[in-house]
Amino acid sequence: MALLVVGALLLVLGLFSGATLALVPLGLVPWSADLIMWVLFPVFSIGGYLLFAMGARIGNIRALTNAVSWLLLAMAMLCAVALVLDAAAIIGPVGSLLSLWYVMIVAGVLGAFGAGAHGKSDDIKAAPSTP
């Protein structure tokens, strides 16, 4: 039970760090995103997921993986949209867009791995053996 709680808390903190890194340069939140947030985003996201998975049942792991993958991919797409809107001079960022690139890549890779983790392996039927 302790692993579930600690893992969930770390995962939420990791996702919050990533969201902060994505929202601060757009001026959507009045916070700041220091260098430590760049480290905490992937470390807490991965570490929290692993701790949660160690303490969870198999069905819960699949549900968590799907939910976190959707959140990470949505975060990556938010960053991609913001970068395109900035390139088209539709929006003007408050600060450097480097953190948007970072979150887009990290969240995109982690989200894609999570989404693919339970891909079509369940649908594959065992091939009949030939004598």
Image: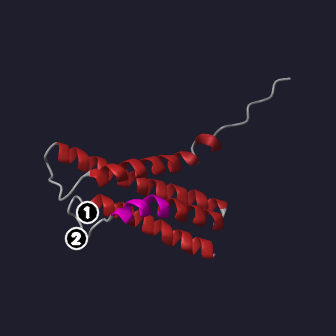
Question: Which image quadrant for residue 123?
Answer: top right
Q: Residue 118 at what x, y percent from top left?
A: 58, 48
Q: In what element is the residue under mark 2?
A: loop
Please, what is the dominant secondary structure of the magenta stretch?
Answer: helix
Q: Is residue 121 above or below residue 62?
A: above
Residue drawn at (38%, 65%) of the image:
36
Instruction: State left or right for residue 58 relative to residue 37.
Output: right
Q: Is residue 63 above or below residue 116?
A: below
Decide: is 38 above or below 88.
below
- Residue type for callout 2: Pro
Instruction: Check residue 79 for magenta coloring.
Output: no
What amino acid is at disc 1? Val
N-terminal of the pair, mark 1 or mark 2, is 1
Of residues 51 and 112, the one drawn nearer to the viewer in this rendering:
51
Q: Secondary structure at mark 1?
A: loop
- Colour mode of the rendering: secondary structure
Residue at (55, 59) in percent of width and height: 63
The residue that mark 2 highlights is 30
Left/right of residue 93 with respect to residue 72 in the rendered view: left
Q: Is residue 122 left or right of residue 68?
A: right
Marks 1,2: beta carbons within 8 A: no
Which residue is at a point 49% across and 72% down the rendered structure image? 9
Q: Residues within 10 Å of mark 1 (few under 14, many from 20)?
A: many
Label ID, residue 24: 1
Q: Position of residue 40 (x, y in %)?
A: 43, 64
Percent across and percent down for residue 108 are 41, 48
Q: Which residues are magenta?
A: 35-44
Q: Quadrant of the N terminus?
A: bottom right
Q: Residue 92 vs residue 70: left or right? A: left
Q: Residue furthest top?
A: 131
Where residue 37 appears, x then y in whole percent?
A: 37, 64
